[in-house]
Amino acid sequence: MIRLPGGRLAAGTPREAARLAAGAGWFLGPSARRVCRAGTAGDPPTLHDLERRWAGRVSEFLGIEWDVAGLEHVVRDRRLIVLPLHEGFADGLAVLRLGMDARFVARDELFEWPTLGRYLKATDQVLIDPSAGPAAYRHLLRAGARVLEQNEALVVFPQGSILGVEAAFSRGAFHLAERLDARVLPVVITGSHRVWEYPYSPLVRFGQRVSVRVLPAVPPGEAVERATALEAEMKQVALSDTMAPARRFRPEVDGYWDDYRYAIDPAFPELAARVAAHRESLSR
């Protein structure tokens, strides 16, 4: 494995390393700056068009083999909260392929990344500090309302982490949808972790298959009631044979991420018990 300067990106061969370095130089340099300028200028139509173009070109460069179904369920011109499964940074490319004008909810720690931090700030994405508790939720309510009032979709990753399919959904995203009187659009994404599995590995892989399934939207007012069933349905789709393999959480390899707040879905009892036992051992 050959790491590029900075250490976050790596390639498997010298040829791929040269290709990756050239692509990163362009897509994280002049191409990204153009997107940021549109955001700073306060020009949402141009911004969202450039975001989709950028995502499409990055996808082509990486040779991603997209396997997409359910686009007929994408609801435009209505208040919409998009709830995707979360495997890695390439999930953003998948969401942008849906053709919506969207803003993403992300952890404020991503500001520490030079290029990504500039993008998040310049394009007015919704940054939250999960450790802030109720204050973070109030900020999300205010920011989310502004996004929806601009006829943009709000993208919330309900797992809040890229641990794997076993990570439980936070119910906060569903309560947010009801408070904002918005439809929920479930999006199942698998295989994206194989493109770039950072922070577990810096290796960038070319030519990976990524599956995307858009499920029917949940009407306003039904999000909380249907949250448990919807989580189960999305994960059942993710683990089906028709999808690219989903990311699985392996704490013996990935670590237990003790500094992060997360829960394991009870549908995976063996893993839930293992994580609980680990946490119990830390408290002794």
Image (cartoon, rainbow, N blue to C red):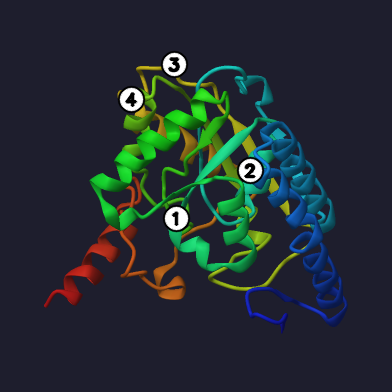
For disc 2, the marked residue is 243
Label 1 CA crowd tier, 10 Å (few <14, some 14–19, many 20+) = some
- Which comes sooner in the sequence, label 4 or label 1? 1
* Residue that appears at 44% across and 66% down: 250
The answer for how far apart the CA atoms under marks 1 and 2 are is: 28 Å
Contact, mark 1 vs mark 2 (Cβ under 8 Å): no
Task: Return the residue nearer the eye: 96 or 147.
Answer: 147
The answer for how far apart the CA atoms under marks 2 and 3 are is: 26 Å
Q: Is residue 12 above or below residue 52?
A: below
Could you tell me which secondary element the residue under label 4 belongs to?
helix
> Which circle, 4 or 2, is nearer the viewer?
4
User: Residue 179 shows which numbered tag?
Assistant: 4
- Could you say which quadrant of the image residue 115 lies in? bottom right
> Which circle, 4 or 3, is nearer the viewer?
4
For disc 3, the marked residue is 219
User: Residue 107 shows which numbered tag?
Assistant: 1
**Type of amino acid at the residue the image marks with label 2:** Met
- Which comes sooner in the sequence, label 2 or label 3? 3
